[in-house]
Image: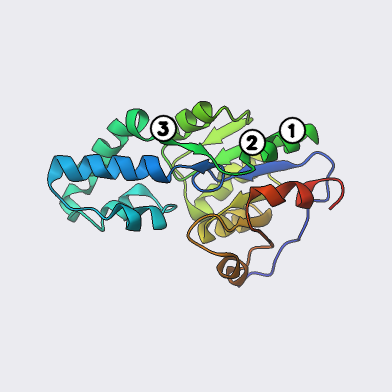
Amino acid sequence: MVEPVATEIRVHAPSVGFDLDLTLADSRAGIAAVYDVLASETGVPIDTAAVVRRIGPPLEEELAYWFPAERIAEMATRYRAVYADVAVPATTLMAGAAAAIELVRALGGRTIVVSGKNQADTERTVAFLGLPVDEVVGGVFGADKGTALRAFGADAYVGDHTGDVDAARAAEAVAVGVATGSFDAAALTAYGADVVLPDLLAFPEWIGPSR
């Protein structure tokens, strides 16, 4: 395992990247609703509780639990076709999300959302939630997020998944885990996150002037 980079940001105006689903956005109900549509249209039973427990990796990985390989592309297209109307309106902010973004801005820093969700739906979700971020990048997962984070000059990346730790490592940024997704604090710590917070409500204490 790679040794941790740091446990804090040592700049006055930090650039911070955030994951979207289950970090900034509670998309569980919306994603479950889209899978309900797929189940209804295809007659394939889908356990949406299992789906939301695995939120994070690329869409095609989840679809492979329910559909044969030859139908994945078709189902992914259909999923994305209904997402804007079904999932986005059902999405809410995670606790502390808006305050975390505003705090980075108040410190003179910049924010970027980097998500595994496709670009269009990432942008729609950020806009629907009213998050005033500086840049939005979708369609990348795990270490592949590192390219966007590097281009943005991210000092830290905040996410709920072990893949987000990989993203931070790839960008040589501080890996900040939030235990609001499928990985608890112990799992994120064991994987190598530099900092683990219970949720974004704890973010100000970590990044703020009093940390």
Residue that badge 1 annotates: 105
In the rendered image, the residue lying farthest to the right is: 210
Query: Could you tell me the amino acid type at mark 2?
Result: Ala
Along the viewing direction, whichever of 163 and 202 lies nearer the viewer:
202
Along the viewing direction, whichever of 205 and 172 lies nearer the viewer:
205
- Horizontally, residue 157 falls left or right of residue 181, namely right
Query: Could you tell me the amino acid type at mark 3?
Result: Val
Task: Name above or below for residue 54 compared with residue 123.
Answer: below
User: In terms of image quadrants, where is residue 78?
Assistant: top left
Residue drawn where x is 68% and y is 41% of the image: 100
Name the secondary structure under disc 3.
helix
Residue that badge 3 annotates: 88
Tell me, for residue 98, which label it has, or none.
2
Query: In the rendered structure, are the residues bearing label 1 and label 3 in contact, judged by CB atoms less than 8 Å apart?
Result: no
Residue drawn where x is 59% and y is 70% of the image: 186
> x, y (%) of residue 86?
33, 32
Disc on the earlier residue, 1 or 3: 3
Which-is-in-front pick, marks 1 and 3? 3
- Horizontally, residue 62 falls left or right of residue 72, namely right
Quadrant in which the N terminus is drawn:
bottom right
Which-is-in-front pick, marks 2 and 1? 2
